[in-house]
Amino acid sequence: MKKETLVTNKFKIIGLIVYYVVLFTERLLAVIFSINNGGEYALTSGHYFNYITYCVTVLSLVAGFVLSIKPVAGMLRSLFSKGFYPFEENYRYIVISAMVLLYGGMMHTGFTVAPIQFVAYGFLIAAMVVRTVEKCMEDKTKIYPSVVSVIYLTLFSMTVPVCYIALKLGELTIPFFIAEFAAAFILIPVFGIMLYKFFNDGITSFSPANPLIMFVLSGMAVALKWREEINAFVLIFVILTVLFYLAFGIIARLKYKE
């Protein structure tokens, strides 16, 4: 095993472990403090939306913790040893547990600390950047699709809408809740599949179905809440993701097939 690969592998492990720890901690605090804090987002506010988000957060914490025990233990052993952690056999478990935990991250609770969540996602993105560096070192002919992959995945991940409460939508309230929960629950596995392929191959999937699904689901969530509030963050990243795919993703898909 090359020394450079061992070094990048450890950086990749650090990024993934910090993602788990930071997001898990923030969501655990959310479960504890969301009971009485957050006004309309507090569990005690009596709004059925909060019961749903609270249950999803708790379930994602429990399931994410259980599923992450084996891959995190393996990564910790590798981090503090001179050996190499066999990622090729464990990417699936790492991505599944990370995406399960992400379900909780997409629930806006009475105690949601967005900056801390962005720190967690930042370390996940850092691990992706390290994987791109590895791919570029091992096969210089794949530099373009690999670099495009990490940018595309980063943009795509930002299009998954956080599930917010709605107070002024009237008859559109239920359709909006359905739209935003559908977007989160469908796009997280889509992102997970793309992330698994990326970690496994160094290049993600550039199937046109992925940005199309994202555009429809996230677009519906943004459109249905437009009358009350424009979710500018998701809207901007939906546009950026589509434009990036059209400008670079299609070319990367063609190059990857060569």
Image (tube, rainbow, N blue to C red):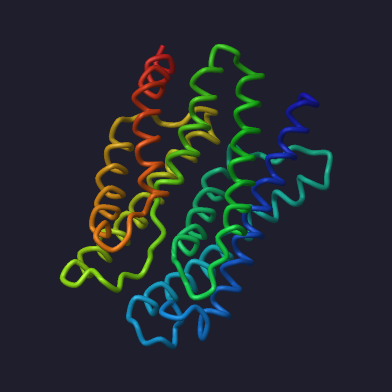
The quadrant of the image that shows the C terminus is: top left
Total number of numbered discs in the rendering: 0
Residue at 45%, 67% (x, y): give it.
Answer: 108
Residue at 26%, 71% (x, y): give it.
Answer: 168
The quarter of the picture where residue 86 lies is top right
Name the residue nearer the viewer: 214 or 167: 167
Above or below for 156 versus 100: above
Residue at 45%, 46% (x, y): give it.
Answer: 158
The quadrant of the image that shows the N terminus is: top right
User: Residue 59 appears at what percent x and percent y?
Assistant: 47, 71
In this picture, residue 102 sits left or right of residue 176: right
Q: Residue furthest left?
A: 171
Residue at 58%, 53% (x, y): give it.
Answer: 118
Above or below for 135 versus 83: above
User: Residue 133 appears at what percent x and percent y?
Assistant: 65, 26
The quarter of the picture where residue 70 lies is bottom right
User: Residue 145 appears at what percent x and percent y?
Assistant: 49, 21
Name the residue nearer the viewer: 159 or 194: 159
User: Residue 93 appears at what percent x and percent y?
Assistant: 54, 50
In this picture, residue 208 sits left or right of residue 127: left
